[in-house]
Amino acid sequence: MSSFKLDRVLEADSMLVSKLGLCQLRLMNDSRWPWLLLIPQRPEAEEIYHLTPLDQTLLTFETCETARALKQVTGCAKINVAALGNQVRQLHFHVIARRTDDAAWPKPVWGVGTAIPYDRGKADGLKAAIVDAL
Amino acid sequence: MSSFKLDRVLEADSMLVSKLGLCQLRLMNDSRWPWLLLIPQRPEAEEIYHLTPLDQTLLTFETCETARALKQVTGCAKINVAALGNQVRQLHFHVIARRTDDAAWPKPVWGVGTAIPYDRGKADGLKAAIVDAL
């Protein structure tokens, strides 16, 4: 059995927030919208149905808890949840806080403009608030 | 307790494929890409964490089975799964078959161009194939 190794693009674009039971929870380094990633730590999973039923249930639990925490921390209008994987095949879920005045609303955020990296302190504050809310 | 009523926009944009344990499974009337919707038949649910834990598990099961069936029927390169809800608030999951030569690849399909409705026979054939594969 091969061991899990985080995709290099996901690793470069995001910062570790916490390791949950199944997933790595990471913060995308783009301050335009609070944008989390959940990456199941299972090698070779590319589609949700590649996970075992138990892992699917864990993923759902962690996605719901992450979405609820992100809503609580940000007070956003809507949470967007998605697994696309057209560019990075390693299975990963986006959990994104959307405001009605953000730069892409009401369209999706993928491919819109250029990421604006966080100031270190602001990212640390957001990561800590998410962990507290979980 | 109020009863479930399908959102009018979702109803107008899609065709019923089947009623599953939790969700209505529907086919978006856009022949550019095989695009299914799963709508949990629960009134007032807008975010996944509004569902009970049992319903969350059912939704995950139905999403995985739908994704697997869509992959089998279309032989697509990638399945995209998402719950956005920025425009229609009733909770609904998109399950979309993507080809590397489709009109939006590798970007998401939302907001791209204009829907091309199916010929009646082609939609019926796709719906029947999905039901067979489930």
Image (cartoon, coloured by chain):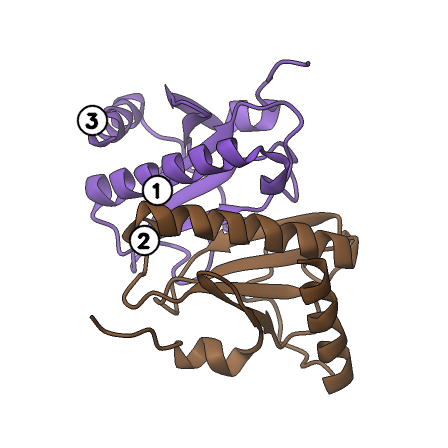
Chain colours: A purple, B brown
Q: Are marks 2 and 1 in contact (CB under 8 Å)?
A: yes
Q: Position of residue B51 (x, y in %)?
A: 32, 53
Q: Please tell me whether mark 1 sits on a helix, a strand or a loop.
A: helix
Q: Do the residues labelled 2 and 3 touch (CB within 8 Å)?
A: no
Q: Residue B51 carries which label?
A: 2
Residue marked by disc 1: A64
Q: Distance between the residues labelled 2 and 1?
A: 9 Å
Q: Distance between the residues labelled 2 and 3?
A: 23 Å
Q: Of label 3 and label 1, which has the lower sequence position? A: 1
Q: Looking at the rendering, in which quadrant would you find the C terminus of chain B?
A: bottom right
Q: Looking at the rendering, in which quadrant would you find the N terminus of chain B?
A: bottom left
Left or right: where B123 falls relative to B6: right
Q: Mark 2 lies on which chain?
A: B
**Mark 1, other Cα within 10 Å: few <14 / some 14–19 / many ≥20:** many
State the residue at coordinates (57%, 48%). B64
Q: Please tell me whether mark 2 sits on a helix, a strand or a loop.
A: loop
Residue marked by disc 3: A132
Q: Are marks 2 and 3 on the same chain?
A: no
Q: Which amino acid does label 2 sit on?
A: Leu
Q: Do labels 2 and 1 share a chain?
A: no
**Mark 3, other Cα within 10 Å: few <14 / some 14–19 / many ≥20:** few
- Res. A15 in view: yes
Q: Position of residue A125 (x, y in %)?
A: 23, 26
State the residue at coordinates (33%, 37%). A66
Q: What residue type is labelled 1?
A: Cys
